[in-house]
Image (tube, grey):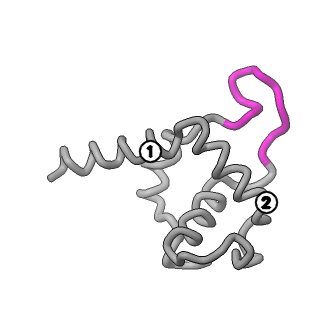
Amino acid sequence: MYPSSATTDAQWALIEPLLPPPGNAAGRGGRSEKHDRRLLVDAIFYLVRGGITWRELPREFPPRSTVWDTFTRWVRSGAWARLHDALRDQLRVRL
């Protein structure tokens, strides 16, 4: 969709296991996720890489309120910090 922010299959294979489980996983109940997690990650990367406002998020991505809610939920859960640390550690080992 947007090559500058689209995650490759290899990148997604590294990122996906580091994200928190969906709300309906682990037997806790809850509604299943409506939007694909990879598309949500791509939308967040699009915003960060482009330095644009949330209101300028293209319509091809999930609604900006959904992207924002997901982003803030993952920030509060520490998922972004864990993701950053894990990817940094993998890079350091490789180098």
The residue wearing badge 1 is 83
Q: Does the magenta stretch include residue 26?
A: yes
- The percent coordinates of residue 70 (x first, y second) are 69, 50
Whether 74 is drawn above or below 62: the answer is above
Q: Is the magenta stretch mostly helix, strand or loop?
A: loop
Residue farthest along the left direction in this orientation: 95
Disc number placed over residue 74 in the picture, else none? none
For disc 2, the neighbor class at 10 Å (few under 14, some 14 to 19, many from 20) is few
Q: In this view, does 54 lie to the left or right of 51?
A: right
Whether 56 is drawn above or below 7: the answer is below
Q: Are marks 1 and 2 in contact (CB under 8 Å)?
A: no
Q: Distance between the residues labelled 1 and 2?
A: 22 Å
**Circle 2 SS class:** helix
**Circle 1 SS class:** helix
Camera-side residue of 92 and 55: 55
> Which quarter of the figure is the N terminus placed in?
bottom right
Q: Disc 1 marks which amino acid?
A: Leu
Q: Nearer the viewer, mark 1 or mark 2?
A: 2
1 or 2: tag closer to the N-terminus: 2
For disc 1, the neighbor class at 10 Å (few under 14, some 14 to 19, many from 20) is some
Q: Which residue is drawn at 53% across and 70% down?
A: 6
Camera-side residue of 20 and 71: 71
Q: Which residue is drawn at 20% across and 48% down?
A: 92
Q: How many marks?
A: 2
The residue wearing badge 2 is 65
Q: Give the range drawn in magenta.
A: 22-33
Camera-side residue of 53 and 2: 53
Q: In this view, does 16 lie to the left or right of 38?
A: left
Whether 31 is drawn above or below 64: the answer is above
